[in-house]
């Protein structure tokens, strides 16, 4: 039996085969070949496989994200089969004596240049698509694994690190657990694992060994243990734990339909953090009261080109409509730091977490922001929308956001497009500055949501991405909790509401304190809705509340 100890990042016990994921290095290939006939045959076979892969991806995207999501892969399939592209490859092979790889590379670059020189913005964007198609054919020619993971059966995915953009593209039904050698339980990848309800362990050093490939292992996402070749006693104990968890989940299901009310009658909203429409079934299954945080950047991370207004509208609408009037708080684009996209290269920064991210990027690039705000306002006609701005630290940033919203509303009115005129606009309290300025912010914003993940990072000056700092990254630190209390008092003085959407919201040890502070809403991963409800329903805020507040101070 071999036990590897990591840090538990998403609870749950699971067992299955290990799948070791290593990013393939860029393929190396010769430029010229002796036998053009053989090279042409290699190209044709790779082209057919690329086309089949793309058709499969389009079907999956259609199921998970609707027609707009499928469009991209359908376009790629058309490009892979394009006769002009094929002719260019053939000429390079037959006339210039190039290998299939060199011919694909040359033709893709030539076509990309041609597309980019066109006047039409749509055609210009096809330049990136043809390069992506070229890379796909090259990967197939070199016999290397897909950059985007295609799994055939459910596995425990083991990797050195996983970027949020890689995680979001995985087929959840094929992942039993995530295990990484590096990473931190506070990273976005860990948050995504919790949102998906998939066990995860980070910092499991020594698991990426070729001899472990395909071996059966147990993963305990709570204790952070990975067990290979478990002896009978350990196997029985882990299976027992799995059953206890299943029984507990069954008991919690009895709370569906019950109010989130304490014994002394205090009621809170308990809503969900989601990544997109694909998470709505989990919201429903766990009886979430709506969506308290949709991280809209996940749409951007899933795409290979900047999502346009129509695609964004479809995405937001597909979240709002099925909620039938329950509120969805959609957060505007929060990329930068660990969330990067290739098609929007951001300047290299010494301290990206303190750099050009979130609302700073949006206010610096109003061209990007305007497209998102237009899509959001158009989507507001289909449900109960609230818009939330991330990483605000000064009131002027929020008022600049509001001004852009008003401009978009004027445009839509002139165009005769339907939208809701009183979409609430909120501020995330995730910088110490926002907490300290909550009095002023409460005078201009309609509602607030505390992002405890970043609030902890910035209050404690402690990088949430670093696995080595886990013992210092403490969201329970009084400095963080006092910030929340201070903000709650100021915000309530102005008659506004305040929720918490960082990971701390789902920590049931904190529920009693949050009730005592008067927090109005807790937004948690879908699997935490019923545990939080259970805790709320078993507490009486008069018993410990006053003491907890006194101990906290502030
Ligand atoms: C937070 O910082 O707590 C938050 C909810 O935002 P994110 O985790 O996406 O940075
Ligand atoms: Mg944040």
Image (cartoon, helix red, strand yellow):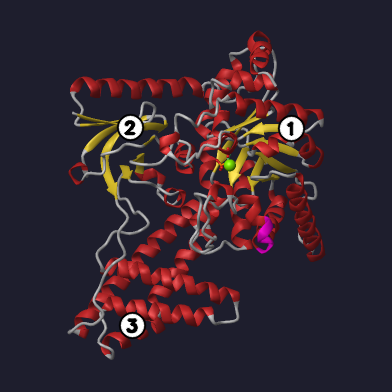
- Quick check: can you spot residue 259? no
Note whether 369 is above or below 6 in the view shown: below
366 in the magenta segment: yes
The residue carrying mark 1 is: 497
User: Residue beneath label 3, please?
Assistant: 89
Residue interval drawn in magenta:
363-367
**Few, some or many residues within 10 Å of mark 1 (<14, 14–19, 20+):** some
Q: In this view, does 265 lie to the left or right of 148?
A: right
Which residue of the protein is positioned furthest toward the front in this rendering?
350
The stretch drawn in magenta includes residue 44: no
Residue positioned 47% across, 41% down in the render: 465
Residue behind label 2 places its C-beta within 8 angstroms of ligand 1: no
Mark 3, other Cα within 10 Å: few <14 / some 14–19 / many ≥20: many
Q: Which residue corresponds to the image point at 41% horizontal and 59% vertical from the top-left?
A: 57
Q: Is mark 1 on a helix, strand or loop?
A: strand
Helix, strand, or loop for circle 2? Answer: strand
């Amino acid at each position: 039996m071999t036990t590897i100890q990591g840090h538990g990042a998403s609870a749950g016990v699971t067992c299955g085969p290990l799948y070791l994921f290593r990013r393939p290095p860029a393929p190396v290939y010769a430029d010229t070949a002796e036998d053009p006939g053989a090279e042409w045959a290699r190209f044709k076979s790779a082209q057919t496989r690329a086309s089949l892969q793309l058709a499969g991806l389009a079907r999956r995207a259609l199921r998970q994200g609707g027609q707009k999501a499928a469009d991209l892969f359908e376009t790629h399939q058309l490009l892979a089969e394009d006769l002009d592209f094929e002719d260019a490859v053939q000429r390079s092979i037959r006339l210039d004596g190039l290998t299939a790889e060199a011919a694909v590379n040359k033709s893709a670059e030539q076509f990309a240049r041609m597309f980019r020189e066109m006047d039409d913005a749509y055609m210009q964007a096809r330049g990136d698509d043809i390069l992506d198609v070229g890379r796909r054919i090259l990967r197939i020619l070199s016999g290397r694994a897909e950059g985007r993971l295609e799994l055939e059966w459910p596995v425990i995915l083991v990797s050195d690190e996983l970027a949020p953009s890689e995680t979001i593209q995985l087929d959840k039904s094929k992942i039993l657990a995530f295990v990484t050698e590096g990473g931190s339980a506070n990273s976005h990848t860990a948050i995504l694992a919790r949102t998906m309800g998939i066990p995860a362990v980070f910092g499991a050093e020594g698991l990426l060994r070729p001899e472990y490939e395909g071996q059966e292992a147990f993963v305990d996402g709570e204790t952070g243990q990975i067990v290979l070749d478990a002896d009978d006693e350990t196997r029985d104990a882990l299976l027992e734990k799995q059953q206890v968890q299943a029984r507990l989940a069954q008991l919690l299901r009895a709370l569906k339909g019950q109010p989130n009310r304490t014994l002394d009658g205090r009621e809170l909203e308990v809503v969900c953090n989601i990544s997109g429409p694909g998470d709505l079934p989990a919201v429903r299954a766990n009886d979430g009261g709506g969506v308290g945080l949709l991280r809209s950047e996940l749409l951007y991370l899933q795409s290979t080109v900047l999502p346009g207004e129509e695609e964004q509208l479809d995405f937001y609408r597909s979240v709002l409509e099925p909620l039938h009037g329950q509120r969805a708080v959609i957060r505007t684009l929060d990329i930068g730091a660990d969330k990067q996209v290739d098609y929007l290269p951001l300047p290299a920064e010494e301290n990206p977490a303190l750099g050009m991210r979130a609302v700073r990027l949006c206010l610096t690039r109003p061209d990007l922001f305007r497209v998102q705000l237009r899509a959001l306002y158009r989507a507001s006609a289909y449900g109960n929308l609230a818009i939330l701005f991330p990483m605000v630290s000064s009131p002027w940033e929020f008022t600049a956001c509001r001004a852009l919203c008003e401009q978009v509303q004027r445009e839509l009115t002139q165009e005769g497009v339907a939208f809701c005129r009183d979409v609430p606009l909120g501020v995330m309290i995730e910088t110490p500055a926002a907490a300290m300025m909550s009095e002023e912010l409460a005078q201009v914003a309609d509602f607030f949501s505390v992002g405890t993940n970043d609030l902890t990072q910035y209050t404690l000056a402690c990088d949430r991405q670093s696995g080595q700092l886990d013992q210092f990254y403490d969201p329970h630190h009084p400095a963080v909790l006092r910030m929340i209390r201070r903000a709650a008092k100021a915000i309530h003085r102005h008659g506004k509401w305040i929720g918490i959407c960082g990971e701390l919201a789902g920590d049931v040890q904190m529920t009693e304190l949050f009730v005592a502070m008067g927090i109005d809403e807790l937004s948690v991963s879908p699997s935490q809705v019923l545990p939080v409800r259970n805790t709320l329903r078993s507490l009486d805020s008069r018993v410990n509340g006053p003491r907890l507040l006194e101990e906290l101070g502030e």
